[in-house]
Image (cartoon, rainbow, N blue to C red):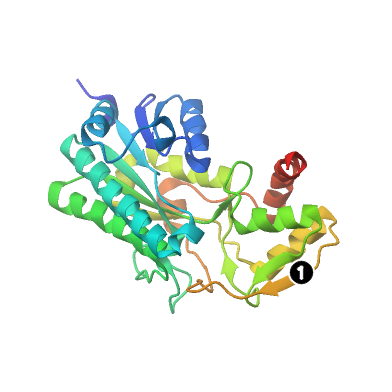
Amino acid sequence: MVRVSELENPIYMKILVTGGKGAIGSKLMLKLKELGHEPISYDMADGQNLFDLPTLEEAIKNVDVVYHLAAQANFNYMRTLEGAHDGVILNVGATEHVAYLCAKHRKWMLYISTMCVYGDVDVHPVHEDTTLPNPSEIYAASKYAGEWVVHGYGTSFDLEYTNLRIATVYGPGTRMELGVHVFMKQALQGAPITVHGTGEQERTLTYIDDVVEGIVAPLQHRAASRKQAFNISTVERISAIKMAHDIKTLTGSSSEITFVPQRPHNTVREDVDVTKAKKLLGWEAKTSFASGLVKTLPWMQEIVRKG
């Protein structure tokens, strides 16, 4: 008898999502359910600890697939010494626990990494299989270390894995610390829109719905995804200063655009090749930055209205 988890395009799978109550995880849970799967959250918000191996093992051995999203992703916190220490323990240590248990119980592990692993490189656009990542700060370094832990279990113990390097995500429900949301809140409140440095730094800001579609795309292309890394990002590059002007125009704000000191170790340019995801997964981002801002605005207006 063929197990559900061995099928290339299964109709139904039980899928564990670490960080299932987070901004991306919660939307991933909804998408998996929409696709006919049974998503199961494993989240600290529910008192579930990734360092409690017996409990984590029980959760993993009873599912077909594991998405590992849980991480410390607060850049500001990880720019402090104590925050870096806590973040590395979670981002590397917990990833090792998930990889170990997935290898032990022969589960497919999809690890959610980040475009930040590339940092500043000399050749653009960055490509998963030819660009050597150069993490520019501890958060990115910890996520790249997580990738190597997963890769190591794949090499030594034949863990089935897929590494997904997702871009900076924006849109309803995502973290309020992100630049799009900070600028939009400032514009709606009539406060100065604070751009770091010269504002020339660029990001491939990707709308939340597109990212979630990219995260689930490997489920329909399992063989092609095995032991592969994919860039899940738009190719549209947006500078911080353009973002500020676009948001000011969209909101009709009278806010002044001001410049504040650049953050240390800030990546200057993101420029991404997504040919591999398009070819092997049939995925590419569909939402332009302009239309993504329009979709995000009502949510931000409600956030500001509620104070």
How far across and how far down the image is residue 184, in percent?
A: 72, 54
Quadrant containing the C terminus in the rendered view: top right
Q: Quick check: 226 left or right of 22? A: left
Q: How many marks?
A: 1
Q: Residues within 10 Å of mark 1 (few under 14, many from 20)?
A: some
Q: Quick check: 171 left or right of 69? A: right
Residue kind at label 1, given as amino acid type: Ile
Q: Quick check: 282 left or right of 287? A: left
Disc 1 target residue: 257
How far across and how far down the image is residue 15, in percent?
A: 36, 30
| Residue 194 in view of the camera | yes
Residue at 57 percent of width and 64 percent of height: 203
Residue at 25 percent of width and 30 percent of height: 55
| Residue 7 in view of the camera | no
Residue at 77 percent of width and 41 percent of height: 305
How far across and how far down the image is residue 14, in percent?
A: 35, 26
Quadrant containing the N terminus in the rendered view: top left
Residue at 20 percent of width and 43 percent of height: 100
Corner quadrant of residue 208:
top right
